[in-house]
Image (cartoon, rainbow, N blue to C red):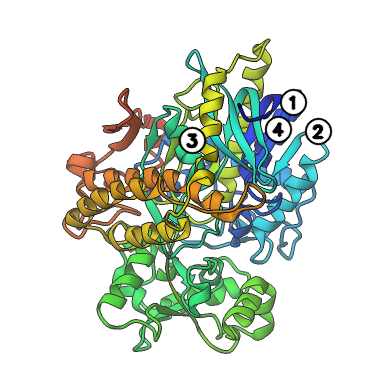
Amino acid sequence: MSEKYTTHEYDVVVIGAGGAGLRAAIEATKKGASVAVICKSMLGKAHTVMAEGGAAAALGNKDPRDSWETHFRDTMKGGKYLGDWRMAEYHAKESPDRIRELEQWGAIFDRTPSGLTNQRNFGGHTYPRLAHIGDATGLELIRTLQERGIHTGMEVFMEYTVRHLFKTNGRLSGCFAYNRVDGSLHVFKAKTTILATGGITRCWAVCSGSWEYTGEGHALAYWAGAEMGDMEFVQFHPTGMIWPPSVKGILVTEGVRGEGGMLTNSEGKRFMFDYVPEMYREEFADTEAEAMDWVQSIVADETPTARRPPELLTRDVVAKAINSEREAGRASIHGGAYLNISWRPEEQVKKKLPGMYHQFMELAAVDITKEPMEVGPTAHYVMGGVKVNPETQESTIPGLYAAGEAATGLHGANRLGGNSLSDLITFGKRAGEYAAAAAVEIKEYLDIDSKEINEAIEQTLAPLKRKGGENPAKVVQDLRELMQLKVGIIRDGGQLQEALVELESFRDREISTSPGGTRIYNPGWHQALEIGAMIDISKMCAMAALSREESRGGHTRLDFPVPDHGKWGNINSVIVMDDNGEMNLSHVSYPPIPERLKKLLDAADLHEEE
């Protein structure tokens, strides 16, 4: 007897309800499309909320010297010139309008004394560029988009997990999902589909992501045959909480350093001066006195004349520096570094960083206005994802679009802080616009093979039929520990090869897991279903990391410790499932950067002479 399921029909189905998904849905409904938004958790429980520091856009409010050209340069340079210059150009040019649009929709940004949207400094940005609301920018962005979105006519399906994407004659035709509360089964027919499912960082034991971030969106695209790019580049945010153990990995916003927070080791030394890479040498202070001059100017709300403090180097540099201090025996008491903002007046800290003040008081009994925080690297963001057309955001599968962290291209080897929020709204809008335009041209929904639907149902219900197997939570825990140990912030070829072998052994464990219980609100069942995606996503990261025999951005190899611009200069990894169901890796390059944009970049950093 076949299982019952409910069929839905929408012009555009958006999978994910974070910043990218909501912005896409708003744009698609604006174009007249019927839109369904499917989200794994509750509306408002999106990782966009965790982006605390701000949204990067060259408004020029705090420093009139800023421009889209400088933002483009910073993004390309921060990504170690492995990003798609076409996406970087769209992003730099369009993000200011997306911020102004949010203001028109009711977003309440902090203001300069003259009443303009305030902007703060962040790592890798030449000028103060992050529009912010204290340290709760992502929360305000989600609030604004939800408020706007619920009045547009889109329908929201909360607590649904999408398990399978359907293709008909090579084109995406819909998806299969189940309701996490009651276990009911659903087929969504769609003329176009947008993946806005966020990232993959729950594949690591220490991460800033919550339970949703298991990489299922990335896996759905891969299983459907889409090309995946740059999966070796995983960003370990330099500052996550490290104590107490119950909160290990929770994000400490880069805004702390943007407001003058200083990093020191167990000896009290401000160590970041020792880790400034040559390519950034001219932009950052050489001495603590020079760095303090810069800090004092931003505290006084003036345009800085001194060079920036080294704490505002890009995230990959700061994370690896903290790791190096730990390896050298100079870690904080619990194995990280100290981050100190207590030198600023108490009322300023509480005004500028209210979330951080309450987070440390409530979770760690630390008053950041009086004592330093303990921080350390935490898996935070994946630069890799679904390869998309830079203009339309369509993947290599017709009818499947991707935006936000689920897509790749903008950030190259390393994402600049603040570029994530402006990425979401810039390319979420583009995905919604082009997906809706394509849907309007399709007159009828494509048929979905009933056999394929029944196979998806059978695979989804399979764990509930197994008895006496392993607890899925233990399998997930072991996989995360493996990734932390062998595909973490510092890698080497031997450990990566071991990881690839060990990951394959998890497939047998996956198919023997037994969550017990029924379909009704069964977390063990949900977790058992996530393991397959986690294995494939983890394997992609390890495979791409083993292939790239150099260190660059979010990818560091002990056995290849420096960038190799001669061999790997502008080459990006691509992973796709072959006809035999095997993971196939190759390397490609984006089109050459045109002269009109190349002249905006640092010629020496392009390494073209090699």
Question: Tag 4 or tag 3, which sits nearer the N-term?
Answer: 4
Task: Residue at 35% x, 54% y: name it.
Answer: 554
x, y percent for residue 106: 80, 50
* Identity of the residue drawn at 37% across and 66% down: 319
Q: Which of marks 3 and 1 is nearer the N terminus?
A: 1
Q: Residue 36 carries which label?
A: 4
User: What residue would you read off at disc 3?
Assistant: 220
Please identify, in this view, whether the residue under mark 3 or under mark 1 is nearer the observer.
Answer: 3
Estimate how packed mark 2 is, as few (under 14), some (14 to 19) or many (20 or more) residues with alpha carbons within 10 Å: some
| Labels 2 and 1 touching (C-beta < 8 A) | yes
Specify few, some or many for label 3: CA neighbours under 10 Å numbering under 14, 14-19, or 20 or more: many
Residue 245 in view, yes or no = yes
Badge number at residue 153 = 2
- SS at badge 1: loop
Front-lying residue, 321 or 584: 584
Kind of residue indicated by mark 2: Gly
Find residue 313 and report its image quarter. bottom left
**Callout 4 secondary element:** strand
Where residue 85 sits in the image (x, y, percent)?
42, 36
Q: Which of marks 2 and 3 is in front?
A: 3
- Secondary structure, mark 2, is loop
Q: Which amino acid type is shown beneath numbered disc 3?
A: Leu
Quick check: 475 left or right of 373? left
Q: In this view, does 352 lie to the left or right of 508?
A: right
- How far apart are the two marked residues, 2 and 4, measured between alpha carbons? 9 Å
- The CA distance from mark 2 to mark 1 is 8 Å
* Identity, as a three-letter code, of the amino acid under mark 1: Ser
Q: Mark 1 points at which residue?
A: 34
Alpha-carbon distance for marks 4 and 1? 7 Å
Quadrant containing the N terminus is: top right
Q: Is residue 80 visible?
A: no
